[in-house]
Image: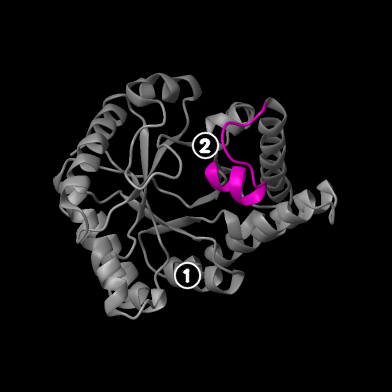
Amino acid sequence: MTDLGFDGPLYILPFDHRGSFQSGLFGWKGTLTSEQTERVAASKAIIYEGLLAAVAGGVPKAHAGILVDEQFGAAILRDARARAFLTAAPAEKSGQHEFDFEYGDDYARHIEAFSPTFCKVLVRYNPEGDAEMNRRQAARLRHLSEYLHRTGRKFMFELLVPAEQAELEELHGDQRAYDRSRRPRHMVDAIHALQDAGVEPDVWKVEGLDRTEDCAAVVAAARRAGRAGVGCIVLGRGEDEAKVESWLSTAAGVPGFIGFAVGRTTFWDALVGWRDGRTTREAAVTEVARRYTRWCQLFAQRAEGR
């Protein structure tokens, strides 16, 4: 086995969203003008400054990290690296159902140019889903995994396990029921299947789980067969603050969960206020810092008690 893993804690502020910024935040379709691109980049600068403010306010710098894309965040990635922050950059095309590389076969050059602490992928993988698609995804991901470990880089794998249509129908369209009754088992099976296909992340970034025993099962899957150093972090999925707090609190109580990556719940409301001219830029930065600091404190307090 390669020397996989990352100690943590890992308090990631992810804002590598591309499609959801263009169309969701600003309502823009198609290729952006240079002014529109600058406007998206300016919104991301607010989020980054929120992180810097949180660290100035006492969040431990050694554990604070950003996940941002090259398209809108190249300057931020360079600045964060110059300041010795943990950085992560995505390798996937945005908004695709099936994983593929943003820069095709040229992915390595882009990773080397920014040299982030982590190369991150977002993958939708339901083991009960399209077997052919899962195979294609796993093959691409194995290439990336091997390249990263060969070149001494860290691999962060964001695993989303969306319900298959038939599953949702069985549950009468109840997403919460799927999250509780089906998704935890699928997550474990997906991790096993990907590992068996030669995909070896250092950190699994996973959807929140309601039950401690489900968190423990995911850690056991991530760390099986000698992968003792592999960590898990919990993502926010754009849920409200109460739901994110519940997920963080549950995960933080389980050894092997080393942190979180909560994006939209941290910054979305602040950016919408700024976009609409209802709040100043400074107020938006302060709100991002407040929420991010809250997650850090919550996770640290809960992890101390385990």
Q: What colouring style does the render use? A: one colour
Occupied quadrant, residue 166: bottom left
125 sits to left or right of 257: left
Could one spot residue 17 in this view of the protein?
no
Q: Residue at x 46, y 25 (%)?
A: 115
Residue 22 located within the stretch drawn in magenta: yes
- Front residue (pair 38, 190): 38
245 sits to left or right of 216: right
Q: Residue 105, image x and y in percent?
A: 32, 22
Quarter of the picture containing the N terminus is top left
Q: Which residue is mark 2?
A: 87
Q: Residue 229, image x and y in percent?
A: 30, 48
Q: Residue 202, image x and y in percent?
A: 33, 44
229 sits to left or right of 64: left
The kind of residue tagged 1 is Trp
Pointer 2 local density, CA inside 10 Å: few below 14, some 14–19, many at least 20:
many
- Front residue (pair 220, 275): 275
Distance of label 2 from label 1 (alpha carbons): 23 Å
Does the residue at mark 2 contact the one at mark 1 (Cβ under 8 Å)? no
Residue 196 located within the stretch drawn in magenta: no
The kind of residue tagged 2 is Thr
